[in-house]
Amino acid sequence: MDSPGRYPRRARLLAVMVPAALLGGAYIAQYGFGLPPCEMCWWQRYPHFAALGIGLAAYVLKPAQLWSALAGLAIITSGLIGGFHAGVEYGWWQGITGCSALPSGVDVMDFSAAPLIRCDVAPWSLFGISLAGFNFLISSTAGAAIVALAAYRK
């Protein structure tokens, strides 16, 4: 059986590994498979960037459990944004209009313009779950686990 001291160490490790893995997956999808992110995809990345920095801070700042828990909360935040984004993709609710529709005045025949990436269309899915949906499932679960592990005391 694990000693209680291991739980905060595991929380600290997860607080770095989870956002690093999810950001790595996002960049592989973007650059390796040609799936450019929409605006809401970027919104999901920002809390992971924060969680990564906070998780690294847990290795040098005290109390490490507090920093790990804060990183877990940032990961949960990304998951909640992913859940909202997935709902927009599945048509459960409206998204932000600037990300889900063509802006007025856009010439659809202007091929030199940057591509418009819509937030309400999932560019990829596996078993009916989009990338945003996977972020919701993984981030919410992992973030909650990190917070729970960080809060564990003997």
Image (tube, rainbow, N blue to C red):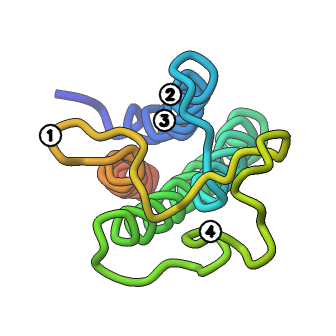
Q: Nearer the viewer, residue 137 or 38?
A: 38
Compared with residue 66, is residue 20 higher up or lower down, i.e. above or below?
above
Instruction: Please name the residue that numbered disc 1 is placed on.
Output: 127
- Left or right: 127 with respect to 87? left
- Please tell me which residue is depicted at 61% across the width and 45% down the height of the picture: 37
**Type of amino acid under label 4:** Cys
Instruction: Please name the residue that numbered disc 3 is placed on.
Output: 18
Residue at mark 2 to residue at mark 1: CA–CA distance: 18 Å
- Please tell me which residue is depicted at 43% across the width and 33% down the height of the picture: 10
| Foreground tag (4 vs 1) | 4
| Foreground tag (1 vs 3) | 1
- Left or right: 23 with respect to 58? left
Q: Earlier in the sequence, mark 3 or mark 2?
A: 3
Q: Secondary structure at mark 4?
A: helix
Q: Nearer the viewer, residue 106 or 133?
A: 106
| Foreground tag (3 vs 4) | 4
Instruction: Please name the residue that numbered disc 4 is placed on.
Output: 99
**Type of amino acid under label 2:** Gly
Q: Which mark is residue 25?
A: 2
Residue at mark 4 to residue at mark 1: CA–CA distance: 25 Å
Q: Secondary structure at mark 2?
A: helix
**Type of amino acid under label 3:** Val
Q: Secondary structure at mark 3?
A: helix
**Type of amino acid under label 1:** Phe
